[in-house]
Image (cartoon, helix red, strand yellow):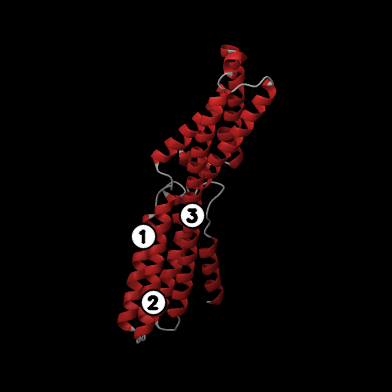
C-alpha cells in the first residue's frame, strides 16, 4: 500500500490521504452532535480535554519520530548515490592509460554506469533490482582483476582501485536496500490507527458554535494527515514524484565520455 501511494502524483496522494479524510472528519462532529446532543457532550469537555492533550502529545512524538527516521534514510539514499558516483569517477581516473586492460576496465565501468541508470532505477521504483546490473558489476570486478594481474600498476594504486570498487558495490547495496521501503508494516499500522483515534477523539468535545468545532476538527485533521503524506512520499526513496534520481551517475558518465 505504501508503495502504491508513494508512486501516485502528489495531488492524488494528497486527495486520498488528506482532503477526503478531512472532509469525512469534519462531518463527524455534526453526526455525533445529532446523535448525542450538545448538553451531554459539554460534560466531557473538562476531562476529555486533559486526556486529548495526552493523546495529542503521544501521537505528535510518534509522527515526528517517523518523519525524522524516514528523512534520515532518504538522505542516506542520496549519500549512497553520491558515493557511488564519486567512487566511479575516482576509478575512471585510476584506470587511465593506453594499456588494453585499463581500457577494458574503463569500458566495463562505463557499461555498469549506463546499465545502472537504465535498468536499476526503473527496477528500484518497483522494489526490485536488475540482474543485468549485477552482471555488469561482476564484469567490472573481473576487468579490474585482469588489470591488476597483467599491468605494471603500483601497489598503492591497485589498493585504491579495489577500495573504490568496493565503495561502488556497497553504495549500490545501500540504495537497493532502501528502495524496498523504510517504514516497517507495524509502524504503518500504528501511524494510521493513531491518526484515526486522534481525530475521532475530537468528536467527543462540544462547543455551542458548531461551525467553529467543525473548522477546528478540519485543521487538526489536515495537520495530522499532512505528516502522514510526508512519510508516504519519501518512504520509497526511488519511487514516485519525490525520489532520488540518477543524475550524479549520469554526470560522471557524460564527463568521461566527453573526455574520451
Crowdedness near tag 2: few (<14), some (14–19) or many (≥20) residues, C-alpha within 10 Å = many
The label nearer to you, 3 versus 1, is: 3
Instruction: Place residue 153 in its image quadrant.
Output: bottom left
| Residue 89 percent coordinates (x, y) | 48, 72
Q: Decide which of 212, 48 is in the foreground and name it.
A: 48
Per the model, the C-alpha gap separating discs 3 and 2 is: 30 Å
Q: Decide which of 103, 84 is in the foreground and name it.
A: 84
Disc with the residue nearer the chain's start (3 vs 1): 3
Q: Can you say whether 160 is above or below 131 in the image?
A: below
Mark 3 secondary-structure assignment: helix
Crowdedness near tag 1: few (<14), some (14–19) or many (≥20) residues, C-alpha within 10 Å = some
Disc 3, disc 1: CB below 8 Å?
no
Q: Quadrant of the N terminus?
A: top left
Q: Decide which of 87, 104 is in the foreground and name it.
A: 87
Q: Looking at this view, name the residue that lies furthest to the left.
A: 149
Residue 72 bears which disc, if any?
3
Per the model, the C-alpha gap separating discs 2 and 1 is: 19 Å
Mark 2 secondary-structure assignment: helix
Label 2 belongs to which residue?
Answer: 161
Disc 3, disc 2: CB below 8 Å?
no
Instruction: Place residue 43 in its image quadrant.
Output: top right
The label nearer to you, 2 versus 1, is: 2
Label 1 belongs to which residue?
Answer: 134
Q: Decide which of 53, 27 is in the foreground and name it.
A: 53
Amino acid at each position: 500500500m505504501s508503495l502504491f501511494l508513494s508512486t501516485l502524483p502528489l495531488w492524488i496522494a494528497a486527495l486520498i490521504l488528506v482532503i477526503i479524510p478531512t472532509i469525512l472528519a469534519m462531518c463527524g462532529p455534526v453526526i455525533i452532535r445529532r446523535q448525542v446532543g450538545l448538553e451531554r457532550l459539554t460534560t466531557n469537555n473538562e476531562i476529555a480535554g486533559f486526556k486529548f492533550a495526552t493523546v495529542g502529545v503521544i501521537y505528535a512524538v510518534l509522527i515526528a519520530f517517523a518523519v525524522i527516521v524516514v528523512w534520515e534514510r532518504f538522505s542516506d539514499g542520496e549519500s549512497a548515490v553520491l558515493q557511488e558516483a564519486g567512487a566511479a569517477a575516482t576509478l575512471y581516473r585510476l584506470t587511465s592509460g593506453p594499456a588494453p586492460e585499463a581500457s577494458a576496465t574503463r569500458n566495463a565501468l562505463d557499461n555498469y554506469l549506463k546499465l545502472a541508470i537504465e535498468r536499476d532505477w526503473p527496477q528500484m521504483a518497483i522494489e526490485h533490482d536488475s540482474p543485468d546490473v549485477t552482471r555488469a558489476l561482476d564484469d567490472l570486478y573481473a576487468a579490474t582483476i585482469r588489470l591488476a594481474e597483467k599491468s605494471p600498476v603500483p601497489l598503492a594504486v591497485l589498493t585504491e582501485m579495489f577500495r573504490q570498487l568496493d565503495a561502488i558495490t556497497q553504495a549500490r547495496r545501500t540504495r537497493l536496500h532502501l528502495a524496498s521501503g523504510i517504514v516497517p508494516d507495524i509502524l504503518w499500522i500504528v501511524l494510521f490507527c493513531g491518526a484515526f483515534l486522534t481525530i475521532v477523539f475530537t468528536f467527543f468535545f462540544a462547543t455551542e458554535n458548531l461551525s467553529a468545532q467543525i473548522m477546528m476538527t478540519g485543521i487538526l485533521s489536515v495537520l495530522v494527515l499532512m505528516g502522514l503524506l510526508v512519510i508516504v512520499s519519501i518512504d520509497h526513496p526511488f519511487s514516485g514524484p519525490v525520489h532520488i534520481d540518477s543524475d550524479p551517475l549520469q554526470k560522471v558518465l557524460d564527463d568521461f565520455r566527453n573526455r574520451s
